[in-house]
Amino acid sequence: MAPVQAREQLRGGLGAGEGSTLLEAAGSLNEGLLFGLSLPQLAHGLQAPVLLAHAWEDAGSVEPLLQAKALLGDQLLGVVLNNVEPDQITALRAELSPALQALGLPLYGLLPRSPLLRSVTVGELVQRLRAEMLCCRERKDLLVETLSIGAMNVNSAMEVFRQQRNMAVVTGADRTDIQLAALEASTQCLILTGAGDPLPQLVSRAQELDVPLLKVEHDTLATVAVIEKAFGHVRLHEAVKATYAARMVAEHCDFAALFSRLGLA
């Protein structure tokens, strides 16, 4: 099916019912361009207004928003900025919002950065790492929010562990001192890398504390790379995430202004 026909079929389907339809587009302005299904192509083909969600880093984050404005024109309703550091929200609302408004980019929300929403389950790490679970198989639903690497001496490791919460700790299979220390901290799973088997007392202690123990064949650097790639992809199939995300959006987005702009108020 040609891209134009696909868009027309989609437009016909969306217009068949009553009320408003919310359609999630691709994750970038160019994704789907080859098939005629990029965000600008869909917006123009469907004559649909666009609310853009964009991750905030610093002032340089405004440039992609201006690019989107140039491509979408008046069809761009405005933006919601996410992944904002909580201590920056008040200042950004006071200073950035008027500046964006002057550029034709109404700001409808500032969503704070959330370790919970960026978290991954132990089960997902098992799958991505192709890890062997040595104990606590029933604990695959635990959420991992942070990552620590146990490659230092045990005293330094303890200082790091005390500053983290709900973490996965990656360390060599031969670092029993680090492993035992990690089990006494806020550890959601302990991941052992490289050759060698854990000591029986380590497995026993992990079972006592209900901390999943994972064994992988990769080295530490490769393991960390896989885990870091898993973070940041928000998956809402976990009920706790879905509930939290809905509450956060309700608290931090101006739906009254958005609905008014859409003529739904």
Image: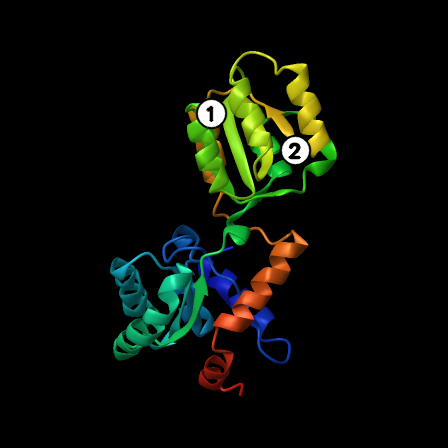
Residue 142 in which image quadrant: top right
Residue 246: image location, x then y, percent: 59, 65
Q: Judge the density around disc 1: few (<14), some (14-19), many (≥20) Cα neighbours within 10 Å.
A: some
Q: Are marks 1 and 2 in contact (CB under 8 Å)?
A: no
**Colour scheme shown:** rainbow
Q: Answer above or below: position of 10 versus 124.
A: below
How busy is the neighbourhood of tag 2: few (under 14 within 10 Å), some, or many (20 plus)? Answer: many
Residue that appears at 41% across and 52% down = 31
Labels 1 and 2: the sequence-earlier one: 1
Q: Nearer the viewer, mark 1 or mark 2?
A: 1
Q: Looking at the picture, which amino acid does disc 2 mark?
A: Val
Mark 1 residue type = Val
Give left or right: position of 43 versus 71.
right
Relative to residue 134, is residue 117 drawn left or right? left
Name the residue that disc number 2 marks.
211
Q: Of helix, strand and loop, which one carries label 2?
A: loop
Q: Residue 12 in the image: state x and y as whole percent.
A: 57, 71
Q: Which mark is residue 154?
A: 1
| The furthest residue to the top | 196
Residues at marks 1 and 2, CA–CA distance in whole angstroms: 19 Å
